[in-house]
Structures are given as structure tokens and as C-alpha cells.
Amino acid sequence: MTTRYEVRDGVAILTLDNPPVNGLSYALRVAFAEALDKANADAAVKAVVVTGAGKAFSGGADIKEFGSPKAAAEPNLLSLIRACELSSKPVVAAIHSVAMGGGLELALGCHYRVTAPGANIALPEVKLGLIPGAGGTQRLPRVIGVEAALNIIVSGEPVKSEFIASFPGQKLFDKVIEGDLMAGAIAFALERADVRPLPLVRDMKVGHPEADAYFKFALNTVTAMAKNFPAPRKCVEAVQNATRMKFDDGMKAEREIFMNLMFTPECVSLRHLFIAERAASKIPDVPEDTKPRDIKKVGVIGAGTMGGGIAMNFLNAGVPVIVLEMKQEAIDKGFGVIRKNYEAQVAKKKLKQEKLDERMGMLTSTLDYAALADCDLIIEAVFEEIGVKEKVFQALDAVAKPGAILASNTSTLDVNKIASFTKRPQDVVGMHFFSPANVMKLLEVVRGEKTAKDVLATVMAISKKIKKVAVVSGVCDGFIGNRMIEQYGRQGGFLLEEGCTPQQVDKAIEKFGFAMGPFRMGDLAGNDIGWAIRKRRYVEKPNLRYSKTADLLCEMGRFGQKVGKGWYDYQAGKRDAIPNAEVEAMIAKHRETLGITPRKISDDEIVHRLVFSLVNEAAHILEEGIANKASDIDIVYIYGYGFPVYRGGPMNYANQVGLFNVAQMMKKFQQNPLDDAKFWEPAPLIKKLVAEGKSFV
């Protein structure tokens, strides 16, 4: 039963019970409506208390029903709220832990609300490209005021219940109950059992003393901060309607806005990502009840930028870390950077000094592999060269305790080969962090041929603990992200040869929504890293063609931001990328060498050659089983490579364009004699999906 019913001391208790967060599924809504009717029909019941089982009052809509007919089937949430309002007996919401989205809207439809301290209160629909659709924009301003309500609705971020309870004149909570919430809620319900008329939020007045000026300011602010997302602007409009319209008219307008947003590309993309992120943690052949190994202490090999960032993730999560280096100077330098990073957070008041001291206190160092013998997880972050990895893993194999997980932070190398350097390949896995590792949310988990299932389960669990979004990849050169980005980079080089400048390419893709274009990204990562990979490719894949412009750039010593010059010039302490005449001259001279007459290339061609190169390579990755599903690839590109969130990742974008249209453009690119015609042959998976009239799933 998704809604439990019991009567205690003359009070009917309706407990929402749909784990994990009591999502308002169709079954729950039916059971709730029946339970409320039962309470109203029972002469022995004086009042009703609504609460949630487990660790939530209610997290809102049930994501398992997104996009299905059940999501809107009667009784829908609006009907449940109206049933609460029309109840002949007082209905008290007893809130704890989490009341978000539809869960909070249901509570706002009750006559009274009591709360435990520490409950997270939010209307997070804006994060899905929507506005609250069951009265949130109309009721919340009535109970906490226009400005506080709009801040909560536009941000979508949770606010603690006791903080809201401190607002002067707030009417969201009638009482904050310390101790036993249910006992307090029952006592409160009995106190109000005979009070009439029953209070309704819909009947409360709402307004703002300087409404026109405030809403104009709010709209301008939101437009500047969320220019590619329509929902935040619509939140402002809906809350403004609450101050201008009668309640029922405001509700009607809210619903109309909600339904219109539901079908925008941005909303479709955000909902896709919401589901994709949760699906990424599920590995088809690893049962969800697989017991993970205990991770109580972590070892990190290397105190450089990557090693230090990796260490910080675990320190932040309260896991002790020991860092191994070859020289004390390297440890001192690395630890100095970690402390400096934490001190910067303290200066910005994002971290308390005692937390800094606590985290640094969990950090130790060693120059001896033997000191890693008690670690449960050891991650190497050393130079990206297979001979170096071999020495590290042989040393780890000799000292690590049985059952310790040995992980490589490699971004391209063969994890199976790395595992073969040990006598325990089942304990070896790839954990590819993205730089800066203490900031970037993506973690590529690379599954070797012999990686044990409980190792995978452990790494996926620990990734959540350190607040990473983990995606599983099979073994191939570059895994998911870097294998795809190589094709993207190749296209960038071909575009230079055909007539573009670096800034034209970067501006076009940044206008599309990328955080930065391929050439600015190359400068940030270090152009010499790509150069080293290409040198390896020239030996391993002699038939794979690259533009020589990137090699010529490196021969000029222009390795990127770290040396102040790459595709662009950089000034110390500034992020501005300044075009360089020598670079443009080098590109022009290279064109002449190839006998190419430059042509004018549209931004549309630039964008689609770059983006669809990702899509075509990704389709091959899916066919080969390197990625489990298309949505995993979208997560990799959103969290690891700056793909625009509102477009939902390369595979989602291809679906929105239509795979027939994508294949047609690829065939057009095949006709370009200066491009790689073989690469632009649509992947077999794309051809199959086009023939079947389907999309990536």
C-alpha cells in the first residue's frame, strides 16, 4: 500500500509510502484519495495528519512515471490538493527531511503545516525547465511573501525549514516541533480539531509594496543570469500573476505556462539529463544489491595538480588520504596547493577554519610504497606513459593488502594492460577524474575485462560519497570522452585548413552554448598533451589524417595558457584569449603549402561538423559496447566537456534535430574533398535507427 492509514487518539494518520522519497505516483495518489475519504467518513476521526515514511515527507513527482499517461491520470496532484482543501476535518501536514516540488505543493494545500527542524524545503521544477505546476507559484508567495518565494522558485535550491520559520510573519509553518514529530503533530491536530472555518492558503492576501519595480528588476536579473533557459523568466511571470490575479485565474495561468514549457527543447533536455544522471549509476550486469567493499582509507600516487585534486575529493568526504611521492619537495609543494585551495574557500566564507584544519589533519604523506599497505583504495595519478604505469602497479601489487582496489587515473591508456601488471586484475579499475579534479563532477569509471563486479559497485558508491557523477566505460583508446573529443579536435583542425580562424571556430561553438571552443580548450588543457597523443597515433594509426596546424603550433613552443601563449596569447592573471597574428600567419602559410584556397565557412557548418563528429563517434562507441547507453554519453559531455546543459548532450541534441537530418548532413560533409570522407560515413547504428524511424535511447 503506497499510503498507509491508521487512527491514533482520534486522528487519522495518512503516511505516504513510496520509497525512496515518497514520489507522488498514480498508485499513491489513488490510495491517498481513498484514505482521505475514509477519514472524513469516520465519525471517530476528528482530524487528519499527512506525513511521509522513511527519509522524506515527499520529494514530489515520481520520476519513474515521467512522460507516461500515469503522470497526469486522475486523481492528479491538483485534485489531491483540492480534496485536502475541501476536507470537512482539518488536515495537518507533518513535514520532515524533504518536502520538495509536488510534495511541498501538497503540504501547501493542507489546512495546517508543522515541521521538524532540518527539513529541506524546495520547489526545484526550474531545474527541469519547468515552473511549479500545482499551485506552488500561487501559494508559496501567500505564506512567505513575494520576494522570498520568488528566490526559492527561481533558484530551485532547498532551504532549511527552521530558516523559513524565522521569517517575520511567515505562514508556511504553524509550528516547529522539536522531538517526536508525530506526537507533536497529533497534539497540534487535536488542538485545531474544532476550529472553524478551516484556513486555506488560497484565501490569503498577497502583494508587494513596489510590485512593478520589483518584478521588472527580477525579470532583468533572471534574464541576464539564465538567458538560454525560458523557465526562470516564466517563474517571475507566474509569481507576478499571483499578485495581479484572483487565485483561480493565477492557477489557470500557472498551468498554461507549465504545459507550454513541458514541450520546449530546453525542458525536454533537462528532464532527459535528470533521468540520465540517475540511470548512469545502474550497470546492467551488476545487481543493485551487490555489496561494496569498505573504503576507510585512500592512497593517492602523485601530489601534482591531478593527485592533489583527487585527494581533496576524499578529504572533503571525511575519508583519510595518504599521498605518495618520490621526493619530499613534491609533497611539500602539492600539500601547499591543497592548503591554498582550502584557504581560498575560507576567505570566501564557503568553508570554516575548523573544517580546513580537520581536512588537512586527515592528510598524510609518504615516500615509501610500504606505507600504503593499509589502504582500501589506491589511485595512481602519475605521468601518462605505459612504462611509468607498469612500475607503479607492480609496486602496488607487492604491498597492497588483499581486496584493496587499485585504480588508474589514465585518460587514454589500456586498463587491461595496466591490470596485467598485477597478479590481481580483478581488483584493477580505471578512475578517470577530470581536471581540476576537486571541481569537475564527472568520473569515468573504466571497466577492465577482469574487473570484479563488487569493485565496480564500490567505485560507483564511493563516487556518490565524493559527489561525482560516475559513468561506466569499457576499455578503448580514450574511453568515451577523449575518444570522441579526438574527432571533434580533428574537425577543428580541418576547419582551420579550409578557411577559419581559431577565434571564428571558438565563437561559433560558444554561441551554440559550449563553455569554450576547441582551441581555447586546447590552450587550457595544454597543447603539448594533444601533440604527444598525436605522435602516438601517427605510429598506431598511420592512415588517420590530422591537420598539421596543431603540430606546427607546438613546434613554435605555444603550449597554451601555462606558458602564456597557444592558439591565443594570455596575460598573467587574466583569462582573456587574445588572437595572435603569428598563429594566423602560420595557418595561412600551411594552407598555401597544401594548395588550399580559403573559403567562407558559416557558423552553422562549424557547429554541425564539430557536434556531429561527436555523435558519429559516439554511435560507434555504443555499437562496440564501450558505453552502456546513449544517455551515459550525454552525461559525460555535460559534466566533463562543457556541452550546453540546455541542449541535453550530443545524443539528445541529435535526437532533437532528427537522426534522418543528422545522417543527411553527414553525407553532405562526406562530399567535402578536404575533410575525412571515411569518417563521415554514418555509423551503422545511425543507419539502423534512421531506417526504423527511431532515436538514440
Image (tube, rainbow, N blue to C red):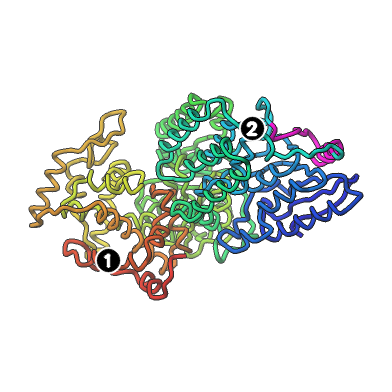
**Residue in the image at 56% along x and 32% along y:** 359
Residue 680 appears left or right of 452: left
Badge 1 element:
loop
**Residue in the image at 87% along x and 39% along y:** 194
Q: Nearer the viewer, residue 271 or 345?
A: 271
Amino acid type shown at disc 1 = Trp
Mark 1 is surrounded, within 10 Å at the Cα level, by few (under 14), some (14 to 19) or many (20 or more) other residues, namely many
Q: Nearer the viewer, residue 207 or 601?
A: 207
Where is residue 209 drawn, in percent x and y? 56, 25
Mark 2 is surrounded, within 10 Å at the Cα level, by few (under 14), some (14 to 19) or many (20 or more) other residues, namely many
Q: Nearer the viewer, mark 1 or mark 2?
A: 2
Q: Nearer the viewer, residue 557 or 51?
A: 51
Instruction: Examine the rendering and report whether any part of residue 451 can be seen.
Output: yes
Whichever of labels 1 and 2 marks the residue nearer the N terminus, that label is 2
Q: Is residue 345 above or below residue 309?
A: above
Residue 180 included in the magenta stretch of the image: yes
State the residue position of label 1.
680
Rounded to the nearest whole Å, what is the CA distance between mark 1 and mark 2? 57 Å
Range drawn in magenta: 171-192
Badge 2 element:
helix
State the residue position of label 2.
144
**Residue in the image at 48% along x and 52% along y:** 267
In which quadrant of the rendered view does residue 351 lie? top right
